[in-house]
Amino acid sequence: MLNKLFYKHYVFLEEINDLIKENLLKFKNINIIIDINGMDKKSLENQKHIIKFSKRNKIPFFFKNNYQKCTKYKADGIFIDSANKNNIKPILLKKAFKIVGSVHNQLEYKKKLQQKCEILMFSPLFYNEKYSKNKILNTYRFNLISLNWKIDLCALGGINIKTVKKIKLTKVKTISFKKLIFDPKIKKPAYNLM
């Protein structure tokens, strides 16, 4: 079993507010994935506030599927979702730049290896409204499908206060989530959730 202090965390953000800021600072090893595609005024303001918060608090941040923004804002890495089949541009392959991808099956796993991903978010681990119940992996199928994968795995999908303790039944070193960061019940320090 992994020591709870060694888990890394990735959170997907489309916006930021006082509750999110407070909760983010309760986590050790937190990384932010900026999940904003819009170019409207509100989207750009949200993006600006997330970047400013990340830099001020020395929190690594990533952009989802956007190489240009990674370069422009000197991001720490990029998140490539499962639908993105493009290979990373060599100009971004600086030493500290990280490539994180997401997968749902073996075929996508092979593609993400070609894209030079260092960490793979494998989903959906637990139930969430985005997927039908028959697509949910749960810990047994999660472990079985990824048994021979030679890469650091990250759990994604349906992670909340009730399911987070089950993460210990997998071999992951990283956890990613969206809605958990909005939960006012997160205590300080947040790794006590595990």
Image (cartoon, rainbow, N blue to C red):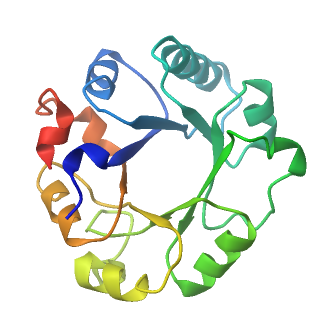
Q: Could you say where residue 118 lies in the image, as x and y percent from the top left?
A: 60, 59
Left or right: 2 as drawn, with respect to 176: left
Q: Is residue 193 above or below residue 175?
A: above
Q: Is residue 124 above or below residue 91?
A: below
Number of numbered callouts drawn: 0
The residue positioned 55% from the left and 16% from the top of the image is: 55
Can you tell which quarter of the image residue 57 is in?
A: top left
Q: Could you say where residue 5 lies in the image, as x and y percent from the top left?
A: 24, 43
Left or right: 162 as drawn, with respect to 75: left
Q: Could you say where residue 147 lies in the image, as x and y percent from the top left?
A: 40, 85
Can you tell which quarter of the image residue 66 is in?
A: top right
The residue positioned 67% from the left and 31% from the top of the image is: 75
Q: Could you say where residue 121 lies in the image, as x and y percent from the top left?
A: 47, 62
Comparing 82 with 90, the one in front is 90
Can you tell which quarter of the image residue 77 is in?
A: top right
Q: State which quarter of the image contains the N terminus.
A: bottom left
Left or right: 88 as drawn, with respect to 177: right
The residue positioned 74% from the left and 72% from the top of the image is: 114
